[in-house]
Image (tube, helix red, strand yellow):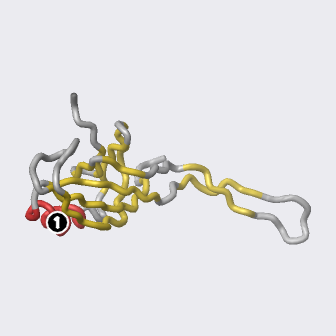
Amino acid sequence: MAILYDAVGSVSFLRLDGDLDYPGTTLADITREGADGVGLRKSALRPKQTTLRGRRDVADELQAKLYVDTEIPSLRGTIVNIRLRGQNHQNFAVLDARVLSRRRVGKSVGSLTSGDPLYLIDCEFTVIYAGVP
């Protein structure tokens, strides 16, 4: 049985939580003061920034340090493909990427790596769709 995983760019995760937003119509309120009713105008197709949280496991302290100090910060400011719940999404800009926590645990069960001790790293990404609507 294949291990399912999510990914931001080339960095894999056991799981990513959150939803992605694609461009949708935004409305501008052009109601004049003192007028009855509401005036709205379609103004643009824009996506919203969204936040994804992910958990990654690594086999040892050296890999954890490399992951925290190099891999996660290198995603900032890049355009990536995101794999979320088995679906691939293209052209997302990573506005921010940060590590929330790093924990050492005892045994690996259902992980991307094998080895003891195991380190769990929780990360957070702020992304926005950067493709053409």
* Pointer 1 residue: 70
- Please tell me in which quadrant of the rendered image residue 53 appears: bottom left
Amino acid tagged 1: Thr
Residue closer to the observer: 17 or 87: 17
Position of residue 60 relative to residue 107, above or below, is below
In the image, residue 19 lies at what x, y percent? 46, 49
Q: Residue at x 22, y 31 (%)?
A: 2
- Please tell me in which quadrant of the rendered image residue 96 appears: bottom left
Query: What is the residue that sits farthest to the front in this orientation?
Result: 106
Q: Residue at x 20, y 66 (%)?
A: 68
In the image, residue 94 lies at what x, y percent? 34, 60
In the image, residue 38 lies at what x, y percent? 82, 59
Q: Is residue 30 left or right of residue 46?
A: right
Q: Is residue 55 left or right of residue 20?
A: left
Tally of marks: 1
Q: Residue at x 35, y 45 (%)?
A: 90
Position of residue 84 relative to residue 30, above or below, is above
Residue closer to the observer: 5 or 129: 5
Mark 1 nearby-residue class (10 Å; few <14, some 14–19, many ≥20): few
Residue closer to the observer: 25 or 63: 63
- The quarter of the picture where the N terminus appears is top left
Q: Residue at x 24, y 49 (%)?
A: 12
